[in-house]
Image (tube, helix red, strand yellow):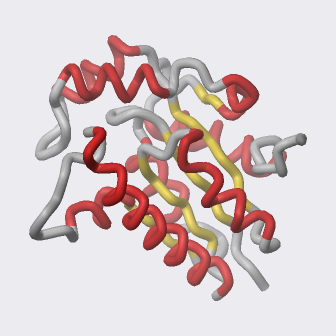
């Protein structure tokens, strides 16, 4: 039996890692918290900051590794929460998993920019570059048809946000569907 895949996306400091940790720790089914940052941190030589244009090829390779790892765990019966800056520009990879029969939900945590920047300043060892964070926040600002996948995590603490995410997942309303042609 396949596990559920949840792509928990958003800009840096949106609360993805903390929420994903709550969703997977003590879950009712076997669960994996797949932290996409770890895949990037694994590159020891030749690393390019992923938000730079010259990182395109690197990002494609890393995303391929993330998607293959996600699929392996999900096909093995694990629920997988993929935590990362995964915008619409990368969703085709996860839609492909849905086409293969894996249930894939896409949720974007998106606090307002001021909250995002304040949270980023308080983080240790993470991205703090204001321009980069502002740019990545902007990349999630207008999601078009995917706007219904957004949860405003700015006014909630991590437990409250995790509770909202659990409700949304239970409803199935954030499942990835095939785009209409």
In this rendered view, identify the residue nearer to me: 155 or 135: 135
**Residue 104 on image: x %, y %:** 71, 59
In screen coordinates, is 16 left or right of 143? left
Q: Quadrant of the N terminus?
A: bottom right
Left or right position of 92 against 31: right
Residue 45 higher or lower than 137, as above or below: below
Residue at image location 40% in from the left, 33% down from the top: 11
Residue lying at 30% horizontally and 39% vertically, measured from the top left: 53
Q: Check the image and name the residue furthest to the right.
A: 181
The structure residue drawn at horizontal position 44% and vertical position 73%, both measured from the top left corner, is 65
Residue 134 location, quadrant: top left
Residue 25 coordinates in the image, percent (x, y) = 48, 65
Say which residue appears at 37% left-offset and 29% top-offset: 136
Task: Give the answer, above or below, for where 14 lies relative to 67.
Answer: above
Report the label total: 0
Q: Quadrant of the C terminus?
A: top right
| Quarter-of-image position of residue 108 | top right
In percent of width and height, residue 145 lies at 75, 28
Left or right position of 30 against 85: right
């Amino acid at each position: 039996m396949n596990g559920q895949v949840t792509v928990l996306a958003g800009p840096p400091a949106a609360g993805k890692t903390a929420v994903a940790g709550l969703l997977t720790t003590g879950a009712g089914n076997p669960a994996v918290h797949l932290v996409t940052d770890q895949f990037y941190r694994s590159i020891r030589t030749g690393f390019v900051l992923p938000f730079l244009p010259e990182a395109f090829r690197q990002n494609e390779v890393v995303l391929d590794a993330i998607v293959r790892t996600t699929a392996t765990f999900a096909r093995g019966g694990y629920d997988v929460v993929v935590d990362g800056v995964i915008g619409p520009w990368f969703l085709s990879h996860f839609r492909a998993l849905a086409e293969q029969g894996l249930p894939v939900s896409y949720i974007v945590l998106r606090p307002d920019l001021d909250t995002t920047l304040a949270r980023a300043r308080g983080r240790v060892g993470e991205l703090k570059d204001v321009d980069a964070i502002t740019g990545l926040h902007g990349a999630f600002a207008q999601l078009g048809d995917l706007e219904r996948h957004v949860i405003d995590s700015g006014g909630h603490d991590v437990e409250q946000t995790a509770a909202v995410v659990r409700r949304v997942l239970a409803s199935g309303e954030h499942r990835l569907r095939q785009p209409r042609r």
